[in-house]
Structures are given as structure tokens and as C-alpha cells.
Image (spheres, coloured by chain):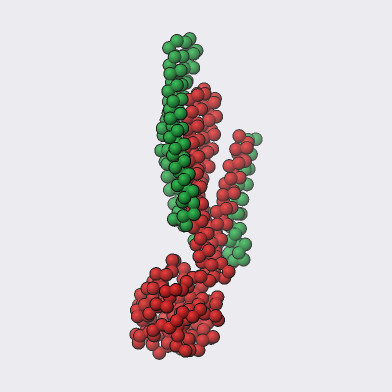
Chain colours: A red, B green
Amino acid sequence: MMKRLLLAPGLLVLCTLLFSVLGVMPSQAAKKEEKWIFIVETSDGTWQTGSTENTVGFDACGSMSKADSNGKYYLDKVLDKCPDPSKYWIYVDGDATLGTTITKNGSLHYDSSLDLFIYKGIAYNTNGAAYSNGHYFMVDWELEVDNLDLSAFADMDPLSYVDGFEFSDAESVRGLAADFYGLLIVLASAGMVLSLISAAMKIAAFGSGAVRSGIFEAIGYKILIFMAVCAFIGLFGLLGEFINQLSKI
Amino acid sequence: MKEQLKKSLLAIATTIFYGVYTLPIYAGNLDASDLNASDLDLSWLNNKGNGTFDEAMASFQGIFASGYALMMVVASGMMVFFLILAAIMYAGGSARSKDDAKGKIFGVFIGCFLLFGAVAIVTLIAGIATGAFS
């Protein structure tokens, strides 16, 4: 009994530690990844791409057609290539002469006189000093903009670079953790079924009162551990919300 | 004494949970303000993963299904055996052995409930536990 008492919290702590590392680390890495992808028009008229972490050495991705006079662009192809667009912003080079707004819902505004972007009420510096025409529009992924040929993106992985931790790695770790959790649930379920069958046989064979209650006690502990494993996601979601509320105090 | 020990272990476990869970966040040299609910939201664990263990899991499930079927046969045989044994004890014995036989029959019924309801019980518990906090 003593061993069991010590074993249960120990196993739960180990599982928690494992899931903490596997779960929170990619979450933070993803947060660091909330950088920007550039699509810039360089001084020679070609379009190039890069990220904020790599503002100097853009990988050339060929020429692209210029935007039309309405200042509207197609971003569908980029959207298709990004697995989780909500985490990313995109900067599209804009010629100030084309106009100042490429949004249709008012959440984006480019103020060429201040050289700032106003995005959801927050001003951002263009930070494009390295480029002669580095006026970057910040485009919300939700926007539908027209007429920009982004065919040059076909062979590009715009999400490949993030501060030493690649986006694909984060997704991979998340996927692995999800797989591991799934495996854990399957193993735990199988273990519970075997435990119940084993208990059934013991109760049938040694069905006296004291022995039976001992068996039920053992099963009870196993059920508690199994419930803890199954409730892990919801439980720590609540804990997360609790910590979040505490941090606001 | 035992009760106090249980409480102490629970308190220690809770403290460790809290510590280890938030440690990786702060270890990343992030401000506390960087912490938000989405960081601690692990609902993505319920999503489809990379399929890393799919093959192993399918293999395990196949083996387990065979093992489960075998165990069901053995355990069912045991139930029948002990039920017959209890019936013989009840039929031919003294008053005391009749009481023992009743206990055995009761045990067999409980055993049958657990045996044939094992999968349903586990599914029910998993369903309740998974949905309890979500």
C-alpha cells in the first residue's frame, strides 16, 4: 500500500514534467515565432522574401508581377502554404503611390507620412531602412486582397526560420506529444481493462469480504490514476486559466 | 498517521505539479506577462499527431484484442467453474459451508459484472474524466 501511495504521485509528477516540457516549450517557441514574413520589392524591381530574423540575406524567389493600381493583392497562395496562418503576419511591400489601404475591414492602415503601420490600433515601425522602398504593409491573414501573383512562393517555405527553433520542429514536437498522449491513453485503457478482468477473477476465486474489499481498494487507486490521465488536458487547461488570472492580479 | 501521510503526499505532489509545469515557461527568460492561458492550454494534445506511434499502436491494439479475447475465455471458464463449485458446496454442505457458498456465488456475480463490463466501465470512466474539465 505504501509503495502504491508513493508510486501514484511519482508517476503523475513524471507525466506532468514530461507533458510540461513537451507541451509548453513548443508553445513558447511558437510564440517566439510570431515574427514576420517579408515580401519586399527591392530596388531592382524584383520581389524577395524573408523573415524579420533574416532581414539582410533574403532568399531570392524570383520576380513577381506588380500590384495593380488599386493596391489590392492575392494572398491565397501564401495562405495555402501556411499551416497556421493565425500565428503569422505578412508584410507585403507596397508602393506608397498605390494608396494607403489594402484592407477591406479597416483593421489595417498604412500611414505613409508617418512611415508607420496602424494595425488593430497599434502603431508599428516599418523597420525597412535597409531597403530603398521598404514600405511594408502588414496584412492580416484574414484579409482578402486581390491581384498579387505569388507564384514565386511555390518552392518556398516561408516558415522555415525561427530563432534557432524551426516552426516545423515545434509542430513536430507538438505532434509527437499528441501521439505520445494518445499512446498513453490507449495503454492506460488497456491496463485498466486488464486490471478489471484480473480483479474479476480474484473476486470470483477468493470472494471473502476482507479480500474483496482489498481488491476493490486497489482497483479504486487504479481508477483514480486512470481518471487523472484522461482528465489531464482539461485539468491543466483550468490550471492554466487559473495561473493566467493570478498573473493579472 | 496514514491519513496525514496521504495528505502530505498530496500536498507535495500538488506543489511539484505546479512547479514543474510553469518552470519551462520561466526558464525561457520570458516575462511573467508573456504567460497566458493559451500557453497552458494543452487541447492541441487531442489533435491528430504526426502518426509516430500509429503503427506501434495498431500492432499493440491487435495484440491486446487477441489477449483480451483469450482472457475472456479463461475468465469465463473460471466463473463457470467457481459457480459450479459454489453450487456443490451449497447443495451438500453444512450451514457454515452454505454461507461460504453464498459468498462465493456473490463473488462470482461481482466478478461477472467486472469481467463483462470491463470495456464499458473503462470507456465510461474515460469519457467522464475527459469531459469533466473541458
Which residue is at the front of the view, B49 or B87?
Answer: B49
Q: Is residue A80 left or right of residue B17?
A: left
The x and y percentages for residue A154 are: 42, 74
Viewer-nearest residue: A105 or A139: A139
Residue A231 placement, left or right of B2: left
In the image, B63 versus B18, the foreground residue is B63
Q: Where's residue B127, x and y in %?
A: 42, 45
Q: What x and y, as percent, mark residue B116? A: 41, 32
Residue at image coords 49%, 13%:
B97
Question: Against B114, is A18 above or below?
Answer: below
Observer able to see residue A87: yes
Q: Residue drawn 53% across and 76% down?
A: A52
- In x, y percent, where is residue B4? 63, 38
State whether residue A10 is above or below residue A248.
above
> Residue at horizontal 50%, vertical 44%?
A187
Q: Residue at x 35, y 85 (%)?
A: A68
**Vertical order, A47 against A160 (above or below):** below
The N terminus of chain B appears in which quarter of the rendering?
Answer: top right
Number of numbered discs: 0
Q: Is residue A243 visible?
A: no
